Amino acid sequence: MKALRFTRPLSLRGQVVVPKDIRLYLGLEEGTQVVFEVQDGVVSLHAPEAPASLVGAFLNGARLGGPSDAAHLKRVILEQYDDDVS
């Protein structure tokens, strides 16, 4: 897929309007949470991973005899979001 590039002004309150084409592509509706990721001076915005997939990864670990405690769930989340929360 060819990369799309849009330029939008930043408001006094730090807000930016996400272009309609991007909202439609990502399935974003009013009130949807979005994830901002910053790496090497580049900011990306994406729809969050469905919580069901995180729960599924957690439960799969428990079924396979792995840990099923809060520490394990935190590791699953951190791995899913690649160090988003540090």
Image (cartoon, rainbow, N blue to C red):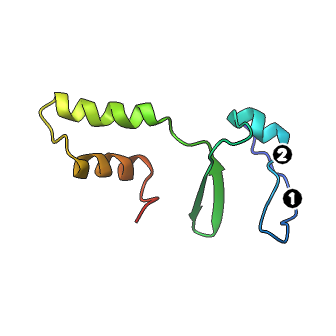
Q: Secondary structure at mark 1?
A: loop
The answer to the question of whether label 2 and label 1 lie on touching residues, with beta carbons closer than 8 A, is: yes
Residue that mark 2 sits on? 19
Q: Compared to 47, does 82 lie above or below?
A: below
Q: Position of residue 5 (x, y in %)?
A: 81, 51
Q: Secondary structure at mark 2?
A: loop
Rendered image: mark on residue 25:
none
Q: Amino acid at mark 1?
A: Arg
Q: Earlier in the sequence, mark 2 or mark 1?
A: 1
Residue that mark 1 sits on? 8
The residue at the far left in this view is 65
Name the quadrant containing residue 36.
bottom right
Q: Position of residue 50 (x, y in %)?
A: 50, 35
Determine crowd level at label 2: few under 14, some 14-19, many 20+ residues with C-alpha closer than 10 A. Answer: few
Compared across the picture, whether 40 is left or right of 69 comes to: right
Q: Compared to 70, does 41 lie above or below?
A: below
Residue at (88% x, 63% y) in the render: 9
Quadrant in which the N terminus appears:
top right
Residue at (69% x, 36% y) in the render: 26
Q: Nearer the viewer, residue 33 or 43?
A: 33
Quadrant in which the C terminus appears:
bottom left
Name the quadrant containing residue 83.
bottom left
Q: Compared to 19, does 15 lie above or below?
A: below
